Image: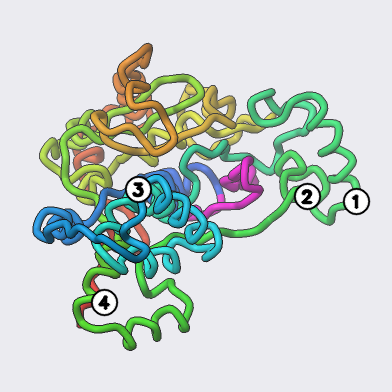
Amino acid sequence: MGQYWKIFNISRREIGQLEGGLKFGEFFFNKQKFLVRSLTIPFESPKLLAYYKLVPERTYEKGLLSLPNELLLEIINYARFATGHFTDFACFAITCRRILILSRHSLHSDKAVEAAGWYGCRIACIGDYARIDDLPDQIMNATQRAQLKKTAESHEDGEAYAGLLSRGDKFTSLYLGMNTWPLALRQRLHSMTKGDRSLYCAAVSVTYPHRDNWALFNVTKKVYVRASALAELAGKPADEQPFLPNCRVDLGHALLLRIAWSYDDSVALQTDIDIHRGPWAGDRFFISTMDRPAPWYNSDFLLKGWTDVSDEIVKDLKEIYEDDADILEGPVIEMEDWDITYFDCDQ
């Protein structure tokens, strides 16, 4: 019958969404919207960037805004953690230009965590025939495997999926704009003035501009895969990055090729590649542009010791697709349209 697969966030004890079927050979040929979006770090919205440039800075001689930046940053950090969610913190941040500018880094970092919820996390695609004792150390070390074995013994799914379901089977969802906000937050917008509402939506919105240097980064191995290499493989080199909406293959396929793990080699694919022994299973990832360090990483981390492995991924994809250009350059297989633009709630 073959084995089923699930995508696990080892760090957060969550399960992701796989579209197209339960067997590897079924979902692999579909676009995996969740997997790609959950790792892709957004840019600031054009409206917010324009606001920074157009609104002149004021000088205050008294009141809260007369305090030095160091003290204001302390207040901002307190508000950031007291509110508990970046959409609430954004209400405080837009109160005036100076506060917004001082909040810029914190707001963007928090938004990256929300929009790219699996960014920097340890991820693996695990088959239900996987065994706990066979898990590599980057997924579970010896101590963790022993604990997992005890936990799995009393769980209804036992050691299926290497017992990882016993650690938690919470499904996570994407941040797709205000349609995913709680009702109370959406109602708050109606109490704002038009100007505040426009600025607020710019502050919390996400956008993924078309650049030619988006890539999937494996932080653990310090290797990366260029979206442009996959666009060229699909015969559409000018397709919009990072999501490559018109290409048969994308960065999600590159990731799935390397993060699958199971004791059993059944992947419902005709290939000699040992997909079930993925060398990246349990590693940490994110998707960003080559010239932009991700939040929380040093500004020069992309420039030192990283290796481009795009050619290796392209080679394996060609083998799986039997180097058939008609198929590789064919129409996209996906369940739903991509939601990749920043949302606007001025209406």
Answer whether residue 192 is visible to the viewer in this image: yes
What residue is disc 3 on? 69
The amino acid type, in three-letter code, at marker 3 is: Asn
Q: Name the spot of residue 70 as percent of width and height, x first.
A: 40, 45
Q: Please say whether residue 3 is one of the residues in the magenta stretch.
A: yes
Whole-Å distance between the Cαs marked 3 and 4?
A: 26 Å
On residue 197, which mark appears? 4
- Location of residue 250 with respect to 273 vertically, above or below: below
Nearer to me, 148 or 158: 148
Nearer the N terminus, badge 2 or badge 4? 2
Which is more foreground, mark 1 or mark 4? 4
Residues in magenta, as a range: 1-22
Q: Is residue 189 above or below residue 306?
A: below
Residue 284, position as x, y percentages in the image: 51, 32
Element at label 4: helix
Measured Cα–Cα span from mark 1 to mark 3: 54 Å
Q: Are marks 1 and 3 in contact (CB under 8 Å)?
A: no
Residue type at numbered disc 1: Ser
Report whether 33 appears left or right of 277.
left
Reading the image, the residue beneath label 2 is 166
Q: Residue at x 27, y 29 (%)?
A: 226
Res 154 label: 1
